[in-house]
Image: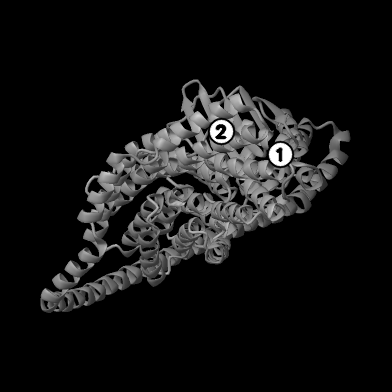
Amino acid sequence: MKKSILYLIIQLFAFLSAAQTINVDSLLYIVKSSNSIEEKVKNYGTLSWALIDNDLKQAIAYNDSIFNISKRYNYIDGIADANYRYSVLNRALGDYDKALMFLDEYEKFITGDTLKIANAAFQRGVLNSIKGDYDEGLRSYQIALNHYELLDHKRGIGMIYNTLGITYSNMNQYDESISNYKKSIKILKSVNDIDALASTYSNLANVYKKKNEYDEALDYFNKSIELSTKTSNIRRIAHNKQNISSIYKEQKAYSKAVEVALQAYNILNEHNYKGELTGAAANLGEIYTLMGNYRESEQILKKHLNNLKGSVKDQSKLYFSLYKLYEVSNRHQEALMHHKEYKKLSDSIINENGLKNFNELRVKYDIEKKDKELVEQKLTLEKQELEIQKKKSQYTLMTGIAIFLLLTSLLTWFLYKQRQKRKDQEILSLKREHQIKTLESLIEGEEKERFRIAKELHDGVNGDLSAIKYKLTALLEKNNSVINEAVAMIDKSCEQVRAISHNLIPPSLKNFSLLEALEDYCSTMNGIHKPEITFQHIGDSIAISKTAEVNIFRIIQELINNSIKYADATEIDAQISNRDNVVQITVEDNGKGFNINNVSENGIGLKNIQSRVDYLNGKLDFSSTEEGSSFIIEINLNQLNDN
């Protein structure tokens, strides 16, 4: 098989993936923004196909991503498509057995899908033809053609014409080959398949080259390069340059030949197309030999002989180039050995069974005859088809209108729900804001009233008591015991008034920090009341607004006062801690406790505490038994209302 069959698979990419010039950066952006597994796999697949002819390594990497994602989520279509691409990628790497193995896996997933069955059969035909197994290759082409005609698939039929052109060319029936290529070109132009058209131009140029019609050959090779540049098909550009170098070689223009051959070889080598480097090396080695550069020729030919890949035709060509090198350099024994290998491979390329199967294919699947039969069938059924088409159009229109109305209704309902949801959220937000402002106003009013009462107690009642004490002290010279008792009572009343005043508005909270105010308050209460009150601070310092400080102070003050008044406690422990901007307040006593089920009835103090906790966006938890009560309050400083 001539080397052109190695590139026939490129046409398969064209109609499978509708290959065009693709912006890889745009595709990468689309992949990253893909939401579903199906979208991500599809977009990775487009990237892999786009890069298969100009960056094989990256194409393999993207297909690995498809396979791994599909396996992880058990996405069957993704696994199937990844296996198909692995088949094509391994063909490009020159590992045809592995390519066939992946194709076997792919065919397990496509039962009942006529187009995919046709594509797989075509791929199998190409792989077997490259390997030199023409029996299997032609049998696969028969299956592919049968399915393409069943589907009236123009691209598929165009590719079969191309396949027939290659087969005729390899049988040296050049007029038949050219006729089939031109039919293929006509069909591919009608469906605007640029990539497949470029491949057919290349194959047609090869036939003209065999006929020594070099001007025609160069014209079609350059047309193929022009279209391949548009689709960024690096492989085909290299393939065409390699063939152009062969024409220059035949014309003995060796300087031009070696320049273009080196370009082709370097392109294939740079992009890791190992399966095609053998043929490029054979061509380059032959040119070096003709130029008398035996050392360069032997170096590149032996390099690829030690790692032999590519089609049977390419391998035979490499042995032939080595044979010619050793023959002209008078190394006859080595020349004979390589000529035997060349002959062995060359004889295996076309055999009697291959010719027999090809003739069967030609008779059984004569394209023109099939086209005529299809036309006759279409004429016979034309009237019925028009009627069916009319009904289909009506059905499609009605279905479209129904779907449109359904989608419009769903969209309207969705927008209504979204708007209602936003309104509900706004109402909740306004309610929350109103509650916060109400609490803020109540707390602010309470603090003002405390300040007013404290001032009146301090400036009014306490002043009057002090004046009475002064006057009574003047009478102490009479040693009246009753007066002494009155003075003592007035001292005690003054002390209680001062304590009440301090409780209502502690001066330490106004002038110092929350922690200092709490220490001062607990110390003062220890001097007045019986229970032993201890205060402890753990962790970081607390930096909050004065409003928040007042509320935390009032919470602890209220809890301590409740323990003093109602619990008959002998010990009260107050603790405040700050870790990672979370303040935890703990107040515990060893008093007689209270019934937590009756809190809602007479627990005014607890309601005040809960209001302040709510204002601070905190959480209150408490428990009480006969052995004492415990209150734990947790406040996140990042969620305070006055932040």
**Front position among marks 2 and 1:** 2
In this rendering, the count of numbered labels is 2
Q: Specify few, some or many for label 2: CA neighbours under 10 Å numbering under 14, 14-19, or 20 or more.
A: some
The quadrant holding residue 564 is top right
Residue 74 screen position, x and y as percent: 36, 39
- Which sits earlier in the primary sequence, circle 2 or circle 1? 1
- The residue shown at (88%, 40%) is 474
Three-letter code, disc 2: Ile
- The residue shown at (21%, 64%) is 370
Residue 504 seen in the current view: no
The colour style of the image is one colour
Contact? badges 2 and 1 (CB < 8 Å):
no
Looking at the image, is 546 positioned above or below residue 482?
below
Residue 441 seen in the current view: yes
* Mark number, residue 496: 1
The alpha-carbon separation of the residues under discs 2 and 1 comes to 30 Å
- Answer with left or right where residue 430 lies relative to residue 372: right
- Answer with left or right where residue 384 lies relative to residue 221: left
Residue 133 screen position, x and y as percent: 35, 38
Residue 249 screen position, x and y as percent: 63, 52
- The residue shown at (64%, 38%) is 582
Residue 591 screen position, x and y as percent: 54, 24
From the viewer's side, name the closer residue of 411 and 101: 101
Q: Specify few, some or many for label 1: CA neighbours under 10 Å numbering under 14, 14-19, or 20 or more.
A: some
* Mark number, residue 580: none
Residue at the disc numbered 2: 632
User: Which secondary structure lies at badge 2?
Assistant: strand
From the viewer's side, name the closer residue of 261 and 24: 261
Three-letter code, disc 1: Gln
- Answer with left or right where residue 127 lies relative to residue 219: left
Q: Quadrant of the N terminus?
A: top left
From the viewer's side, name the closer residue of 476 and 219: 219
